[in-house]
Every structure is written in structure tokens, then in C-alpha cells.
């Protein structure tokens, strides 16, 4: 049994994780952390990690980048693994996550969906085959309440493609430039509207042919399932950085 401390327990993703855990027998939520008090839950609650007085085996974080410092401080003190699903971190915060992994196991991914992680591998393969003969554009769509743009997933895709292409340059706003498209550019475009859960498309545009790889998330459940699977996987692991590729390899 894996005892989970859920950071962001009052949010929409928190509700999805709570529902997911209730359907399983290999884990349970023992405590939640959020500024807003959750309703109708059967676990203890604290408004911050500095106020948390509960036991657990692993933390799942679907909250806000502002929570990172207090969460990592608590996790390192208690020697607790962390599944970090929050997006929108700056470079300094990402460095703190990697530093924490020297002391505790950290599962860090901008997207917990199995399908997304598969299309990332497909995009890397396509970029390797096409080389500079095809231009690459990434289009992501999310609901109108999402705070960060581009999405963490779009950046995951761009970073993966950059591993097989030299000197990639990310272009977020072509309006800021008056020039022809450079071969090393990766265009990244964000759409925000309605209640779109998550849509990602990678466009490989060549001469006289276009390849598109896309993924559509129809509910938040796919992300909740991935996060809970990661938490169960991470229990008992050695300190270090883990991601979806490690989880998939364990299957």
C-alpha cells in the first residue's frame, strides 16, 4: 500500500486524483495540502507544508510553482519521494528540482499521459529521419483557465526534438520577427479557450508533403492515472530523477 500526500488537493486535478485513488486498492491518500480547504474528503488537510502533520510514502504535486520551495524542504526533511506534475517552473526552480533529486527520488514530467509520451518518441524519430528538410511547428490547445503558455508538454516535445536537431531555436511569436523562417526554428503556438483538456500537434512540413502527429486528451483522468501510477512506482526507489520512460520500462 502506498500512502499519498496530495499537494493541490482542492484543484481540478486534485479531484481527479482523489477519484482515481478511490478506485484502486494499492494506494490511498492520507493527507492533502492546499490553500483552499477541500470538501467531502476522508483525509487530513493543511494549508501549507509548514502546517502539515501527517505521514505518507510519497507526495503527488499538482499545485502551483509557488509551492515548490516549501514542498521540497518538507520532502527532503522527511525523505519523501515526490511526483511533480506542476508546470510553469522557471529555470531556477527546475535547478532546485534536480538538486533535490540528489537527496530524494523525484519523478518529474510536464505530462503524465502515456499517449503523450509515446508521441514524443515518435516525434524524435521523425525529426531524426527528416533532418533539416522538414520544418517543425508545435501547436498546443488548452482551456481558458490555464496559467502558463506554452504548456509544459509543448516544451517537452520541443526539447525532445531538439535532442536530435542541432542548435534549435524556439519561436513563440512570429509577429516579433520580419524574416524568412530559419531551418533550425521550432515554432511553438498556444491556443486558450473553453474547456479544452489538452490538444497537442507536431507538424513536420517538407516539400510537397506534410506529416502531423497529434494527441487529444478527452478528460483529466489520463493525467491522474499517470500520476498515481508514478507514485506507486516511486515508493522505495533510490534518490535520483525519474520520468515516464522509467515507468514504462518497468511495465
Image (cartoon, helix red, strand yellow):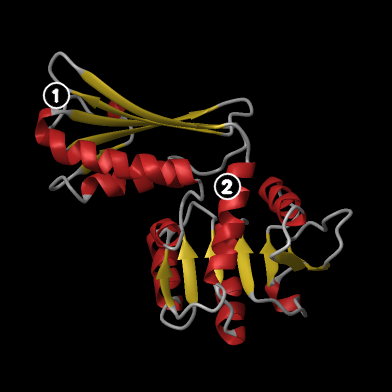
Foreground mark, 1 or 2, reads 2
> 191 left or right of 189?
right
In this view, 210 is above or below 115: above
35 relative to 210, above or below? below
165 vs 39, left or right, is left
- Residue name at image x 42 percent, y 66 percent: 242
Using the rendered image of the protein, determine whether residue 122 is visible from the camera's viewpoint: yes
Measure the C-alpha gap from mark 1 to mark 2: 38 Å
Q: Secondary structure at mark 2?
A: helix
**Can you say whether 247 is above or below 69 in the image?**
above
For the N terminus, the image quarter is bottom right
Q: Earlier in the sequence, mark 1 or mark 2?
A: 1
**Secondary structure of the residue carrying numbered label 1:** loop
Residue 177, percent from left and from top:
23, 29
53 left or right of 144 in image? right
Tell me if mark 1 has few (under 14), some (14-19) or many (20+) residues whose alpha carbon lies within 10 angstroms of its own. Answer: few
**In the displayed structure image, the side of residue 210 where residue 108 appears, left or right:** right
Which disc is residue 223 wearing? 2
- Residue at the top extreme, as displayed: 208
CB under 8 Å between discs 1 and 2: no
Q: Residue at x 38, y 43 (%)?
A: 118
Circle 2 crowding by C-alpha within 10 Å: few under 14, some 14–19, many from 20? some
- Residue 108 screen position, x and y as percent: 46, 61
Q: Residue at x 30, y 39 (%)?
A: 122
Q: State whether residue 64 appears in this view.
A: no
Nearer to us in this view, 23 or 55: 23
What residue is pinned by disc 1? 180
The residue shown at (43%, 56%) is 248
Q: How many marks?
A: 2
Residue 85: give x, y in percent of width and height: 54, 56
Amino acid at each position: 500500500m502506498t500512502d499519498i500526500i496530495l499537494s493541490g488537493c482542492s484543484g481540478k486535478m486534485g479531484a481527479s486524483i482523489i477519484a482515481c485513488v478511490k478506485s484502486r486498492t494499492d494506494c490511498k491518500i492520507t493527507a492533502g495540502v492546499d490553500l483552499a480547504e477541500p470538501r467531502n474528503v476522508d483525509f487530513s488537510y493543511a494549508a501549507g507544508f509548514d502546517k502539515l502533520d501527517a505521514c505518507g510514502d510519497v507526495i503527488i504535486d499538482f499545485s502551483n510553482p509557488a509551492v515548490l520551495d516549501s514542498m521540497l524542504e518538507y520532502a527532503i526533511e522527511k525523505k519523501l519521494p515526490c511526483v511533480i506534475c506542476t508546470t510553469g517552473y522557471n529555470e531556477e526552480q527546475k535547478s532546485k528540482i534536480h538538486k533535490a533529486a540528489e537527496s530524494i527520488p523525484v519523478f518529474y514530467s510536464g505530462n503524465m499521459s502515456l499517449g503523450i509520451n509515446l508521441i514524443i518518441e515518435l516525434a524524435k524519430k521523425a525529426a531524426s529521419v527528416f533532418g533539416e528538410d522538414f520544418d517543425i511547428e508545435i501547436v498546443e490547445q488548452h482551456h481558458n483557465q490555464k496559467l502558463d503558455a506554452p504548456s509544459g508538454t509543448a516544451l517537452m516535445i520541443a526539447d525532445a526534438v531538439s535532442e536530435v536537431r542541432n542548435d534549435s531555436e524556439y519561436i513563440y511569436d512570429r509577429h516579433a520577427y520580419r524574416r524568412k523562417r530559419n531551418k533550425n526554428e521550432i515554432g511553438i503556438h498556444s491556443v486558450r479557450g473553453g474547456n479544452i483538456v489538452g490538444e497537442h500537434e507536431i507538424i513536420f512540413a517538407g516539400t510537397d508533403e506534410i506529416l502531423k502527429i497529434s494527441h487529444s486528451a478527452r478528460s483529466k483522468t489520463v493525467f491522474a492515472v499517470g500520476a498515481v501510477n508514478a507514485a506507486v512506482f516511486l515508493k522505495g526507489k533510490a534518490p535520483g530523477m525519474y520520468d515516464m520512460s522509467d515507468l514504462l520500462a518497468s511495465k
